Image (spheres, rainbow, N blue to C red):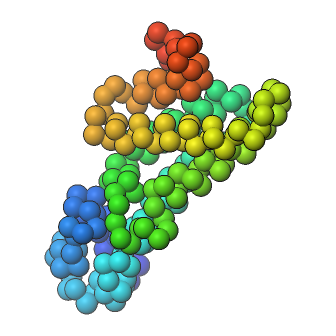
Amino acid sequence: MTGAERRQQLLDVARKLFAEKGFDGTSIEEIAHRANVSKPVVYEHFGGKEGIYAVVVDRETQSLLDRMVSTLHGGHPRAMLEQAASALLAYVEESHDGFRILVRDSPVASASGTFSTLLNDIAMQVEHILAQQFDARGYDDKLAPLYAQALVGMVALTGQWWLDARRPKRDEVAAHLVNLAWNGLSHLEHKPKLRLN
């Protein structure tokens, strides 16, 4: 195995363990055992548990951020909302181990790279788009940060719940999120459906 292949193997094993057991419940010994290597090999590549965890979190953070930001361009505001909700729920569904790692609190993630930091990064992207839309419609664009936090928080917390619930199906969850965000409580549709499908 090349050095790069070994590094990737260790990251894959560590990612699985951190998702199953969290940072505190995972040890270098267990990572090494599952990868069928000695502990010094793990230390050589990452310097310790904190190092390998930081790389795993960084990769997951970047993956989710890339997905979310890539949905936030052009089109009708409702379409962007549908795309963003669908993108987050797709990440939860397709990368549930990564999402579990991101939403867990750990001492290593507390300085940077936390889930709340990631959500703030996404909210800043949404804020920019909302400010343009508010301005174009005669609303106070100074309220865009509040609405951005509310929208991102609503979708993210629902994603955390849906990680374990897995019902209803992803598109139905996204449709209900969009229904609430787009129509508000006073104009909820009885059976919302995504318009993009």
Residue 43 located left or right of residue 80: left
- Please provide percent x and percent y for residue 38: 20, 86
Residue drawn 42% across and 41% down?
Answer: 157
- Please provide percent x and percent y for residue 174: 47, 29
Q: How many marks?
A: 0
Q: Nearer the viewer, residue 150 or 16?
A: 150
Residue drawn 49% across and 36% down?
Answer: 154
- Please provide percent x and percent y for residue 146: 63, 41
Whether residue 57 is visible: yes
Quarter of the picture holding the C terminus: top right
Residue drawn 34% across and 36% down?
Answer: 162
Residue drawn 28% across and 58% down?
Answer: 19
Quarter of the picture holding the N terminus: bottom left
Q: Nearer the viewer, residue 119 or 59?
A: 119
Residue 35 located left or right of residue 111: left
Above or below: residue 135 compared with residue 34: above
- Please provide percent x and percent y for residue 172: 42, 23
The residue at the far top in this view is: 190
Q: Nearer the viewer, residue 35 or 154?
A: 154
Whether residue 194 is visible: no
Residue 47 located left or right of residue 193: left
Above or below: residue 63 compared with residue 130: below
Q: Nearer the viewer, residue 152 or 74?
A: 152
